[in-house]
Image (spheres, rainbow, N blue to C red):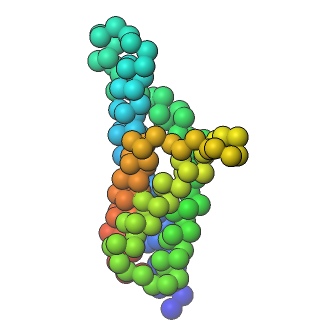
Amino acid sequence: MILRTIGRFIIVAIGFILALTTSLIMLVLVGGRELGQGYVETVNLDPTFSLFADIWGVVLFAAALGPALTILPALAAIIIGEVARLRSVVYYTLAGGAALIALPLLYITGDGITAAMPNTRYMIIFSASGFVGGFVYWLVAGRKA
């Protein structure tokens, strides 16, 4: 009984780490490309620079993303799924998307009356990355919750 519980904790931890890693890789690659293209369009730089826009975007996106990442929404979704013994791929996929889309929504700034919503493209990138992370967690640990 105790060994089974310890084994479950290990599987959950491995699944969580793999889900975070997968989400972060997708977020940086897709978001970095999007940011790089937006940077080139905004600045109107030399066309030769646009060849390096994807790399530059990944660097900028990773630097901006580091402080913003938090694992609490994803951890809450996993705890709810494990305690309720949910095994549905739909739950873990949607919970992963909701957990990652919470990041830009929590970062909304404004004067308190009219807060600025994040760009729709970035909301799609964050939610898609969360969906992938949730699916990876389900593959590793969620199927046997």
- Is residue 22 visible in the rendered image? The answer is no
Q: In the displayed orientation, state which residue is furthest to the top.
A: 46
Q: Residue at x 29, y 18 (%)?
A: 51
Above or below residue 84? Residue 74 is above
The residue sitting at the front extreme is 113
Q: Residue at x 42, y 81 (%)?
A: 86
* Foreground residue among 14 and 93: 93
Q: Is residue 29 left or right of residue 81?
A: left
**Nearer the observer, 114 or 69:** 114
Residue 19 is drawn in which quadrant?
bottom left
Of residues 44 and 56, the one nearer the viewer is: 44
Q: Is 81 drawn above or below residue 29 in the view shown?
A: below
User: How many dots with numbers?
Assistant: 0
Q: Which percent across, then down, holds residue 30?
A: 35, 40
Q: In x, y percent, where is residue 58? A: 41, 31
Task: Give the residue drawn at x 53%, y 82%.
Answer: 83
Q: Position of residue 17 (x, y in %)?
A: 46, 59
Task: Measuring from the top left, give residue 144's x and y in whole percent.
Answer: 37, 81
Q: Identify the residue at image location x=49%, y=84%.
A: 84
The outermost residue toward the bottom is 1
Image-based side of 49 in relation to 20, left or right: left
Along the viewing direction, whichever of 21 and 131 lies nearer the viewer: 131
Q: Quadrant of the C terminus?
A: bottom left
Q: On screen, 79 above or below 134?
A: below
In this view of the protein, can residue 102 be seen by the observer? yes
